[in-house]
Structures are given as structure tokens and as C-alpha cells.
Image: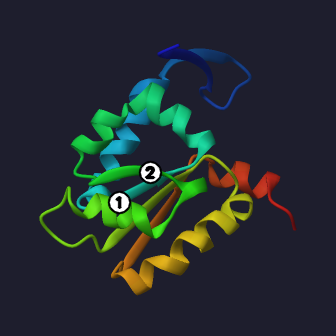
Amino acid sequence: LARLVAPRFEGGGSSVMAAPFDLIGESQRSLFESAGDLMGALVYIDEPFSQLARDAWGIKQLLGTGAVNVCRLETAAAEDLLRSQVLSAEPIAKVVVFTGRLLHDSYADIVGLLAWCAPNGVRSCAIFTTMAEETYSALSPP
């Protein structure tokens, strides 16, 4: 499943040419694009995103970008930060969340995470979703 065939419209006409699409390569490219946000961060992934992380990136590769540790978003707790701190020479001041759900579906988990982050020294949070903006707009409630 590393390569899918996606239709490509060329010349504005009605002819469709199939162009190869490297799904795994695109997923890995997105990981490297977010690598600056991952350096020194405690990373949280939710259940829908964990399959992509496992199949396309690999947790080892995710940690190789500089993430301190990877934890489950649905079970986030202040203890995650304490346990992860022993893996880092610097205090962890950044949290990164990857979700495979719509943001309003992840809202309770993310707010729960952020509620204990600030009092424990976390100063920034980046949230990534696997949904394209167009898909999100089509599926999100009005």
C-alpha cells in the first residue's frame, strides 16, 4: 500500500491521467516538516492517529526527530510529563498533539491535557490533524 494511484486532471480537459501517489512517502514528508515542532517536545497521539504513526512513520522515527516521548492523548496525565522528564536534559516546555479526529471530537482530551500543562511548566502546544482543511470543513458541525 505504499503507492496509490490518484487521478490527475491535465490541460483543463476531460481527460484523466493516473499519477502514482506515494502515501507512505507523503506521510513521512509531513513528519519531517513538523520536526521543528517535535524537538524537545512531549508528543501525544490519539487512537485514530496511532495507526498512521505506527504504519507510516514508526515510533522510533518519531522519536528520531527529537521528540522526548510519545504518549496516548486519551489517557494524558501529569505523570506523563514527570516520567518523560527523566529522558530529557532540559525541562519539557512544549507539547505536540497529533489527532486523527475532527478537532471538536478531540476537544475534551486536548483541553484536559492543557489544563495540567501550564501549571507544570509547559509553555507551548502545537496541534496537528490528519484531516485536510476541505475535509474538516465538510464534516465539522455548523
**Is 82 situated above or below 120?**
above
Of residues 19 and 49, the one drawn nearer to the viewer in this rendering: 49
Q: Is residue 141 left or right of residue 104?
A: right
- Residue that appears at 74% across and 59% down: 105
* Quadrant for the C terminus in the image: bottom right
Of residues 83 and 51, the one drawn nearer to the viewer in this rendering: 83
Of residues 124 and 133, the one drawn nearer to the viewer in this rendering: 124
Q: Amino acid at mark 2?
A: Cys
What label does residue 71 carry, if any? 2
What label does residue 96 carry, if any? none
Q: Position of residue 81 (x, y in %)?
A: 36, 66
- Residue that appears at 47% across and 16% down: 2
Q: Please identify the quarter of the rendering in which residue 83 is found.
A: bottom left
Q: Is residue 36 left or right of residue 124?
A: left
Q: Amino acid at mark 1?
A: Leu
**Is 103 situated above or below 32?**
below
- Residue that appears at 57% across and 56% down: 75
Secondary structure beneath dot 2 equals strand
**Label 1, on which residue?**
42
Residue furthest to the left in view is 89
